[in-house]
Image (spheres, grey):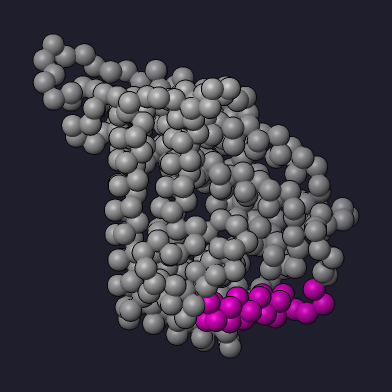
Amino acid sequence: MTDLPTTTERTDHPAPPGEVLAGYLHARAGAFLRALPLAVGEAGSRTGSLPSGGGPQAAATGTGELLRCVRRIGGALHTYSAAFEPEWAEQTRTELRWLLELLAQEPGYVRRSARLLAALDSLSETDPRRPGMLAGHAGAPKARALMERQLTLARTRAHTALLQELRSARLHALADRMTLLAGEVPLVAGGGGELRVQVADALGLLSAGVAALPPARAPYGGEGLHRLGAVPAQSSPVDPVGAVQQAAEVAADAALAADDAPWHRVRILVKRARYALEVCGAGLAELDGIDRVLDRHQEAADAAVTVSTAARTPRITPATAYVLGVVHADQRLEVEASRYAFGHQWPTLQHHGWHEWASC
């Protein structure tokens, strides 16, 4: 048997699997209940005060801890679904997904704003020794103002929606579910089964997801941008409102979204595998690293979509549109860089014998 590749001491679980699983969920539900009032208090403060969700400081806040608990409880209910009463598990997962999406919106806009404005500032750098590509470009200030205005508006809307839902009966009902979960887990007879079998399934799904990634994922050279040229644009002798160009841009966005989708799926599978190992008291540093790489991939892809949307704002100047195009290209290069990093890290992870451990 291959030793477990973990950053922590191996645990052989002398307790029955159902007790191990129940103990994990008790702890996470308790942490959820402690973090909830802190998160509500943070949301009640001024707009933009919620953490970005990236880094130790964000994780230490009520909102960051609440997000962490929601992800882990939902992941455990998914991976070990056969151990729970089906109706209860499905309803709880649905409510956790709702809360996750609600809590993640505003921090997501905060991160996206910071990423895009930093990228534009870097591209506009006027240092004579290393001037940016957009140094002195007339469209840079307008593009920056446009992105900042649109992202601030989106963040404000997300904040307003969060405040409304935090007072809702739906959230109170979910808190009641977590209160019950902190004391009793509705396991079916023989619930828990063999935990390692479920971990092996989660790792197998991850491997299959990676195998389904596009073959040209590793080389880094901006291939994603080159593929935009393959999207056909139908010409028209009369196009007074730019309908042909808009259709081509929408088609290009759809092509990139389809290209990103399997990567986003693998990111979810990585998180589920991490949480499944966590239930067993195991950790895998390499898997954590891959998770961070795919988080950066998602952030860059989402930022590129935001810029593309901003570029279709009515009546913007050609100079502004050009700057937004450069920022979009910069974010797509970040997407390719993340894929390149993944291509180097994944083979290293495969050599750790995790499948053998989980299958024992």
Residue at far front of view = 128
Start and end of the magenta stretch?
13-36
Task: Please state the horizontal and vertical placement of residue 345, each as a whole percent of the image.
Answer: 71, 39
Residue 92 visible in the picture: no
Which of the 4 quarters of the picture holds residue 275? Answer: bottom right
Q: Quadrant of the C terminus?
A: bottom right
Q: Quadrant of the N terminus?
A: bottom right
Foreground: 269 or 302?
A: 302
User: Is residue 18 rendered to the left or right of residue 231?
Assistant: right
Task: Please state the horizontal and vertical placement of residue 311, each as a whole percent of the image.
Answer: 30, 33
Foreground: 270 or 314?
A: 314
Residue 134 visible in the picture: yes
In this picture, is 268 found above or below 78?
Answer: above
User: Is residue 346 rendered to the left or right of residue 158?
Assistant: right
User: Is residue 12 rendered to the left or right of residue 61?
Assistant: right
Question: Residue drawn at (81%, 48%), measured in percent from left and top?
Answer: 353
Question: Residue drawn at (33%, 71%), measured in percent from left and top?
Answer: 163
User: Is residue 5 rendered to the left or right of residue 120?
Assistant: right
Question: Residue drawn at (18%, 32%), measured in percent from left and top?
Answer: 315
Task: Please state the horizontal and vertical placement of residue 25, each as a whole percent of the image.
Answer: 61, 76
In this picture, is 200 found above or below 226?
Answer: below
In this picture, is 11 found above or below 168?
Answer: above
- Tell me if residue 35 is in the magenta stretch: yes
